[in-house]
Image: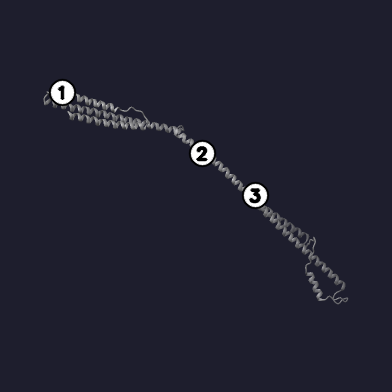
Amino acid sequence: MSEKMMTNKLIANTITCELNELNAKRNLMIGSNDMHITSIDTDHLKDHMDSEVLDSEKDDTNDDSSTDSQSGSDGDESSDIDEEECDRRKDEYMIEMTDLEKQFLALKDQLYVERLSQVEHKLEEVRAGRAAEYLQPLDELQENMRVRTEVAAIVSQLKLTNIKCQFEAEMLANEQNFESEKQLLKDSIRQDVEEKLRRLEEDRNSIDSDIWSESAFSKKKKRYGSAGGYGYDMSSRESMSFQDRRRKPVTVSGPYIVYMLKDSDIMEDWNVIRRALKSVSSSYL
């Protein structure tokens, strides 16, 4: 009888462990998906199994006390009955375990369907722009975009101001350089013209003095006659000194204008100078 009790307890403990494992798996799935599903009361089942074992033990003890006077053949029949009862209970436990496995698979499928529906619903909210997980990062991104846009606008304005200042500085430098070059060119042309006028004045004075000397010499020659006439003979030294005086330019001070050309040639030169001045000034502008 003790072996039968030990066998029943071993079977009960094995089935209880399997039920605990199934409940643990189901609770793990339920906890991961935040669903509240009533679990199987394994403790109640264990108590029920223990009570059945105790009842069987009591029955066995009662049978032992009532059948002490029976023969060895009655003991063999009771052992056969106990084995049949053990097999029956084992089959019942296996059926219950099969039902639990079916319930576990059904719950698993149900959890999968519900989880899939939750994910699809969340995806629809994200696409529609209503999900909290989407709106909060979106607000942060919009705030960052606003700040960066303001910073970019300020930087752009500062760069434009800097470029404008550089442009104005370059324009001012170019204008000053142009005015300086223009003034230098005017001074250079004025100096050239004044130098040419001075040379023309010197040439005019020199020509006037030469003309005056030639006229005076011709008058003197006419007065005293040529060589061998009226007792006046010009020596070779005097003639050479007279020629040297003619070749030596005479410096004349005063506002004299020397005209070596005709009036038409002078006006033509003056027009050429004016056109040159205008072309130079227009090229610098």
Provide residue 119's location: percent of width, then percent of height.
40, 33
* Mark closest to the chain's N terminus, 1 or 2: 1
Estimate the x, y position of residue 125 in percent, counting from the top left: 44, 32
Q: Position of residue 256 (x, y in %)?
A: 80, 61
- Name the residue at the right extreme: 230
* Figure label count: 3
Looking at the image, residue 19 sits to the left or right of residue 165; the answer is left
Provide the residue designation for mark 1: 65
> Tag 1 or tag 3, which sits nearer the N-term?
1
The residue positioned farthest toward the top in the image shown: 66
| Residue holding disc 3 | 172
- Quadrant containing the N terminus is top left
- Foreground residue among 4 and 179: 4
Whether label 3 touches label 1, CB < 8 Å? no
Which amino acid type corresponds to the residue marked 3 in the rendered image? Leu
Determine the image quadrant of residue 155: top right
What amino acid type should be assigned to the residue bearing mark 2? Answer: Met
Q: Quadrant of residue 16?
A: top left
Q: Residue at 51% across / 37% down in the picture?
A: 143
Using the image, determine if residue 272 lies above or below residue 220.
Answer: above
* Snapshot quadrant of residue 99: top left
> Mark 2 sits on what residue?
145
Q: What's the residue at 58%, 44% (across, down)?
A: 158
Q: Amino acid at mark 1?
A: Ser
User: Which is nearer the N-term, disc 3 or disc 2?
Assistant: 2
Q: Compute the Cα span from label 3 to label 1.
A: 130 Å
Colour scheme of the picture: one colour
- What is the spatial separation of the Cα atoms under label 3 and label 2, in whole angstroms? 40 Å
Q: Horizontally, is 28 left or right of 154 in the view?
A: left
- How busy is the neighbourhood of tag 1: few (under 14 within 10 Å), some, or many (20 plus)? few
